[in-house]
Amino acid sequence: MNQRPGSAAVSAPPASVVRIAVDCMGGDHGPAVTLPACRAFLNQHPEAELVLVGAAAALEPARAWNRCSLVVATEVVTMEDTVEVALRKKRDSSMRVAISQLKGDAPAAQACVSAGNTGALMAVARYLLKTPEGIDRPAIAFAMPNRHDGFTTVLDLGANVDCTPENLLQFAVMGSALASAVEGKPEPTVGLLNIGEEAIKGSETIKRAGELLRLAAARGQLDFRGNVEGDDIYKGTTDIVVCDGFVGNVLLKTSEGLAGMLSEFIRQEFTRGLFSRLAALVAMPVLARFKARVDPRRYNGAALLGLRGLVFKSHGSADAFAFEQALARAYDAARNRLLDRVHERIVGTLQASATGAGHNTGDSAATAAQAA
């Protein structure tokens, strides 16, 4: 274990090691949740190392841990802080210092995880890490459960309220890279969230995005399956579902609310009387399996795609088990070269689109595709 102030750099990890920077102060519970989660994660991942960032006193319990470095930060971005406060006033926050571990030619960590303020996390990450060539805006991608006991990756879930057709194409490319890297799907299928499956439906932005996605599919850049509707996310119709951040955030919050309501309904019905309680005892194994399948903690950890570094957002109210899942998702993404895969797919889209349009270069994949 090493302890360093936030201004000092931690050396780059060996090639065989995946090192994750952790904002230990973020979220509703801070170190009370993040430290036990980090301890459990290290026990399960012997090839992982952690850079724990936070107040010196808060990190004291981790002083004797193996495969762990401590970096002191003197400030905390709260859940109520504005983006301006996070960017301009709290320059030594645990969030900012954790993200800064991803910077440079030899970064101290390959991924960062925080449960902090989503808007602040995206703003600080974008300011420090920037976006790579070919990506106009980062997006938030989240794995949602489907009936096949698998995941449907949905993006964007709130980073971009208004999106252009070109943005949606880029989201599809980044989402495909994520599913390929983390879930091992070589050619993930992509659907465009719409009010119907027909190509003529939807807003002008959605219809134009569909055209760009079909062009990309024709060039072999994506496996685009057309428009999908909201229920297709849970059917697992496609591996990736693309939408703008306004729709995506409403979808996510509605899904969370519905899951909570259904769980409460089940609890109420099984506690209405003696016979219902007896039935609950008999059904306990089934109920336990049901709860495990829909447990939102299993799916914790949203990727902030489209940055020059891997940043994962844990739910602010996550418990230790949920935060550990976010660490595991970040670990898998780094171990499977998610950044490189996004870059390769974006470059491939740029080149193919520019060739199709009769140009040698283009400002972005979407611009070239539109020119085609």
Image (cartoon, rainbow, N blue to C red):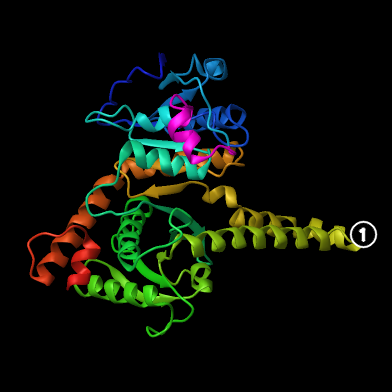
Label 1, secondary structure: give it. helix
Where, by quadrant of the figure, is residue 283 drawn? bottom right
Where, by quadrant of the figure, is residue 28 drawn? top right
Looking at the picture, how far across and down is residue 187, in whole percent? 29, 64
Q: What residue type is labelled 1?
A: Leu
Looking at the picture, how far across and down is residue 146, in whole percent? 52, 64
Instruction: Check the image and report above or below for 313 versus 366.
Output: above
Point out the stretch of residues depicted in magenta: 79-95
Looking at the picture, how far across and down is residue 281, in whole percent? 80, 56
Camera-side residue of 251 and 335: 251
Is 361 covered by the magenta stretch?
Answer: no
Task: Please state, as top left, top right, bottom left or bottom right, where the N terminus lies in the image.
Answer: top left
Instruction: Check the image and report above or below for 138 versus 241.
Output: above
Looking at the picture, how far across and down is residue 198, in whole percent? 41, 85
Q: Which residue is drawn at 68% across and 54% down?
A: 288
Looking at the image, can residue 251 be seen? yes
